[in-house]
Amino acid sequence: MTKYIIVSGGVVSGIGKGVIASSTGLLLKMTGLKVTAIKIDPYMNVDAGTMRPTEHGEVYVLNDGGEVDLDLGNYERYLDVTLSRDNNITTGKIYQQVIERERRGDYLGRTVQIVPHVTDAIQDWIERVSKVPVDESGEEPDLCIVELGGTVGDIESAPFVEAMRQFQFRVGHENFALIHVSLVPDMHGEQKTKPTQTTVHALRGLGLLPDLIACRLIIPQPLAKATKEKISMFCHVASEQVVGVHDVTSVYHVPLLLQSQGIVSFLTRRLNLTSLNLSSNMLERGTTLERRWKTITTDQERLFDSVSIALVGKYTDLKDSYMSVIKALEHSAFQCRRKLILHWVESSDLEPEQQDADPKKYHDAWRTVVGANGILVPGGFGERGIEGMILAIKWAREQNRPFLGICLGFQLAVVEWARHVINLPGSKSTEFVSDPVNPVIIFMPEISRTHMGGTMRLGLRPTVFQEDSGWSRIRKLYGGASIVWERHRHRYEVNPAYVERLHTSGMAFIGRDEKGERMQIMELPNHPFFVGLQAHPEFCTRPLNPSPPFLGFVAAACSPDILEQQMAQQLQSFQPPHPKEAMIGERALIQGSREQLPTAGRERVLTGESV
C-alpha cells in the first residue's frame, strides 16, 4: 500500500510548502524509499500555461509537454524523478473531467455534486498517479508527497481539503500523515504563535489533524524552545511534532535542518515505514544520495571564489519568474566550485529611451552588464524590453563576454546577428511586427493562432548535432553525444529562408531537429562562449547533475581553464537526466499531446529577394 504525506499551508500563501514538501521527500528517499510527488493548485485554470510569470512565477514544462506549477520543478530537482502533467492537479482539470463524465452519462442521471463526485474524482486522481513509476527503478513508488496549494480556509481549496479528509479513511491511518506549514511572525524579537493556533484550529474544524506542524520563520533565528512548547500545548500535538524552518543560507540546507529535528524518525514510526521491504540496492542508493547531498551543502559554505552573472530579463520584479534558470546557475556554480553572484537587469533599462527617462536606472543597468563575468538572456513573450536584450547580446558578442541565450534569448541573438553582422536592416521577429522587412524569426506554421493554452511546441524534443560539429564546446558538454533531448516551449522559430545566409556568415546552427528544418542550438566558433538554445535546458537541471549549457556558460564565465576542465569531465561522466524510454524520436514523443504534427508540405513564411 502506498503511503501518503499531505503538506498543507496556513496564514499566507507562498510560505514555502514546496521546498518543505520536496525536502521531506528527499529525506525519505535517503532512507531508500521510492518517492513521487503531486501538486494540487486550487485555481480554475486547466494548467499554468496561460498565467503571467509575474503573478504566479515561472511556467515549468515537463517531458510530456505539461505546463505546470513551478513546485513540480522543486520535486524533480530534489527527488531526481521525471513527472507528468497528471502530477499537477488543478480545479480546472477536475471540473473538466467531472463535466465530461456527466456529458457522457457516466453518472446515470444522478445529480452531480461537489460531494461525492468532485471529491471522489480528486481522490481517484491522487491514488492513480501515486502508483506511476517516476525513477530509474521503473517500480511503483513507496510514498507520495501531496502538496495542497493555497491556504487552508480559502473558498477554492475547500473541495480539496474535504477530499483529503475523506482520503485519510480511504487509505487508512497508517498510510496517511499530514504536515501543516504555518507562519510564525517575529514581532520585535518575540515569536508570535497566534496565527499558527488559528490555522490549526481551522484545519481541525475541517476534519484534518496535523501530524507535524512546520513553523516557518522569515528570519535567520530558529524556533525558540518556548515557542515550540506553546504551539505544542495549544495545537494539541507533542513537542516532537513541532519543527522550525527558519531562513538559512541556502534552500539546500532545509532537508538537513528538518533531519536534525527528527522528522524522519517520527514519520518512520507514524507511517510504519519499517514494514516496507527495501532491497539492499535501494538502501545503498539512499545512503549514497545522503552523502552526496551533504557534500554539496557543506562545500557550498566553503566557497571563496565567485562568479557574477547578469540576467537580462523582462520579469525581474518577481524572481520566481526565472526559478529554474536560477537553480541551473546555482547547480553549475556548485560544480565549478564558485559562489554565484546573480545580478538582475531589467532589459528595458538598457534601451536608449531610458537614458532620458531615468538616467540613473540606465547607467546602473549598463554598469551591471559591463561588470558581469557572463550575460544570460532567458525566455519570455512580448515586445517590451526586446531592444534592450538585443543591445546586451551585441555587447557580449563584440566584447567576447560569455553569453547564453534561452528560447527568446536564442531568437534575439539571431536577430542581432542579422542586423549587425550580415547587415539586414529591419530584422525582427513576427512576434513583434506582423510584416517586418526581414522576418528572421517566424511563427511556426502548425501552431494554433486562436488558442493559447497547450498549443505551443511543448515538452521533450531531440536535437541532432550536425556532422561537422566536433569542434563544438556545447556538444562536448553533452558528453559528445550525437543526439540530445531537452524540453521546449515556443511558438516561433528561425525562418528557414535565412538559415543558409546566417550559417555561412559564421553563425553555426550545430543542433537541429530530426528533419534538419528547425534550428535548435547555435554557437559561434570564434568566441569564448556564445551559445543559444531554442529549448529550455534549465527545466532538466539537477543539483548533482547540472544542465550542460548552463554548466558551460558558468564555467566560461569563471575562466577558459575551468571551461576546459568541465568539458573534459562531461566527456567522461555526463548522463542525461531523462528515462531511457523518453529519449525517442519527436513523432513518437508527441503522439499523446495536443500538438499537431507538421505536414511535409507545410507553408513557411519566406521573404525578400535579398535572401
Image: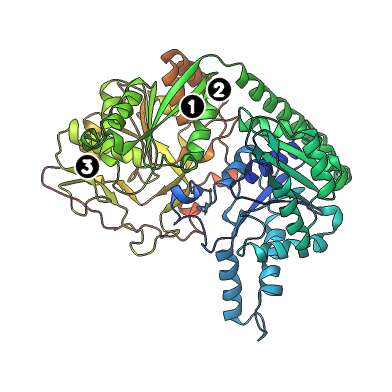
- The earlier-in-sequence mark between 2 and 3 is 2
Crowd band around label 2 with a 10 angstrom C-alpha radius: few (<14), some (14–19), many (20+): some
Residue 454 location, x and y as percent?
Answer: 45, 58
SS assignment at label 1: helix
Q: Quadrant of the C terminus?
A: top left
| Residue 213 showing in the rendered view | yes
Q: Nearer the viewer, residue 328 or 484?
A: 328
Residue 40 location, x and y as percent?
Answer: 62, 56
- The image's mark for residue 498 is 3
Residue to which mark 2 is pinned: 335
Crowd band around label 1 with a 10 angstrom C-alpha radius: few (<14), some (14–19), many (20+): many
Q: Residue shown at 53%/44% (left/top)?
A: 583
Look at the numbered discs 2 and 3 and tell me whether their residues touch, using CB distance below 8 Å.
Answer: no
Q: What amino acid does circle 3 point to?
A: Tyr
Residue to which mark 1 is pinned: 551
Between label 3 and label 1, give the one nearer the viewer: 1
